[in-house]
Structures are given as structure tokens and as C-alpha cells.
Image: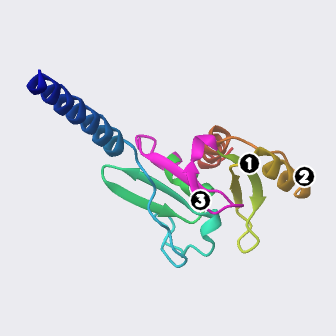
């Protein structure tokens, strides 16, 4: 009886560990981005990590200055199927781009259209109101990059 209980407990423990390690290995987490890192697309330095973005795929991470720069890269490389992260402007933590709310903006240095990502919709709404614009989704950001690529 004692031997059966030990065997059952051992199988249960091994099963739990297998599930734990499978879950841990299947989740992808972003890598840290530092001020001064170069943008994968435009090769300019990342000046503000609260605006940065990252793709992870095939074991490689690529950093981007902003969500807009990343969207332009993806418009030029439609076959890419990487996991996409953006930095929450308010908290600075990375999150999946699909879960972010974006506020359109213009880059003061070069006049390019860009986006600020927010985790919190109310923070995005407040920023959008201050900039006299409306928040958009990641799909909207990608579609705009595709339109820009076509010259529309």
C-alpha cells in the first residue's frame, strides 16, 4: 500500500513539474530595452524606452524606437509572424501590442507620424484629448503603416 502511494505521489509530482515547465517554456517575455540601443529598422538610437517596441521570434529579439517604426517594419515584411511588444508610456513596462491603446502623435524632431502606447484606456483617452486626437488599436497602427507604404 505504501509503495502504491509513493508511486502515485511521484507520478503526480512529475506530472505537475512537466506542466509547469511546459507553461514556462511556452510563454514569451520581452527582453530589456536600454536608452541608446539601436532601432532594428532605422538604426537610430532609442532615446526614450517608454516609447520603445520589440519583436521576438525564432529566438531573436529586435528592438524598435517606437510603435510607429515597428509598424513600418512590419508593413515592409508582411511574412513576419513574431510576437510584438510595446512599452506602456505611463508605467514603462512591456505589454503585447494587441492589448495596448495607442495615441497618434507627431515626432517633434522629424515630423513623422508616430504613436504612444498605453495599457490603461483612461490614460490614453486623457493623452488623446490633450493632443486633440482619438485613441486607436494596434490593427489601426498597422493599417496606417501599410497605407503610408502604398503612398495613400
Tag 2, which secondary structure? helix
C-alpha separation, residue under disc 3 versus residue under disc 1: 12 Å
- N-terminal label among 3 and 1: 3
Residue 134 vs 92, above or below: the answer is above
Name the foreground residue: 147 vs 117. 117
- N-terminal label among 3 and 2: 3
> Image check: 18 left or right of 3?
right
Region rendered in magenta: 75-99
Verify whether residue 10 appears in magenta: no
Question: Which mark lies nearer to you, 3 or 2?
Answer: 3
- Residue at 28% in and 34% down: 16
Residue under pointer 1 = 120
Residue under pointer 3 = 93
Quarter containing the C terminus: top right
Residue under pointer 2 = 129
**Coordinates of residue 118 in the picture (x, y in percent):** 70, 52
Quarter containing the N terminus: top left
> Image check: 121 left or right of 12?
right
Tag 3, which secondary structure? loop
Task: Please tell me in which quadrant of the rendered image residue 21 appears.
Answer: top left
Residue 27's disc number = none
Local packing at callout 3 (Cα closer than 10 Å; few below 14, some 14-19, many 20+) is some
**Coordinates of residue 115 in the picture (x, y in percent):** 70, 56
**Coordinates of residue 109 in the picture (x, y in percent):** 72, 75
Residue 16 vs 45, above or below: the answer is above
C-alpha separation, residue under disc 1 versus residue under disc 2: 14 Å
Residue 34 vs 15, above or below: the answer is below
Amino acid at each position: 500500500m505504501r509503495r502504491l502511494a509513493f508511486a502515485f505521489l511521484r507520478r503526480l509530482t512529475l506530472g505537475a513539474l512537466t506542466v509547469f515547465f511546459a507553461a514556462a517554456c511556452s510563454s514569451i517575455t520581452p527582453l530589456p530595452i536600454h536608452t541608446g540601443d539601436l532601432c532594428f529598422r532605422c538604426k537610430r538610437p532609442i532615446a526614450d524606452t517608454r516609447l520603445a517596441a520589440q519583436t521576438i521570434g525564432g529566438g531573436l529579439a529586435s528592438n524598435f524606437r517606437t510603435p510607429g517604426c515597428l509598424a513600418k517594419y512590419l508593413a515592409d515584411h508582411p511574412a513576419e509572424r513574431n510576437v510584438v511588444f510595446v512599452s506602456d508610456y505611463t508605467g514603462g513596462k512591456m505589454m503585447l501590442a494587441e492589448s495596448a491603446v495607442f495615441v497618434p502623435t507627431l515626432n517633434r524632431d522629424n515630423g513623422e507620424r508616430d504613436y504612444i502606447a498605453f495599457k490603461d484606456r483612461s490614460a490614453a483617452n486623457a493623452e488623446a484629448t490633450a493632443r486633440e486626437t482619438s485613441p486607436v488599436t494596434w490593427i489601426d497602427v498597422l493599417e496606417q503603416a501599410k497605407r503610408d507604404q502604398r503612398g495613400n
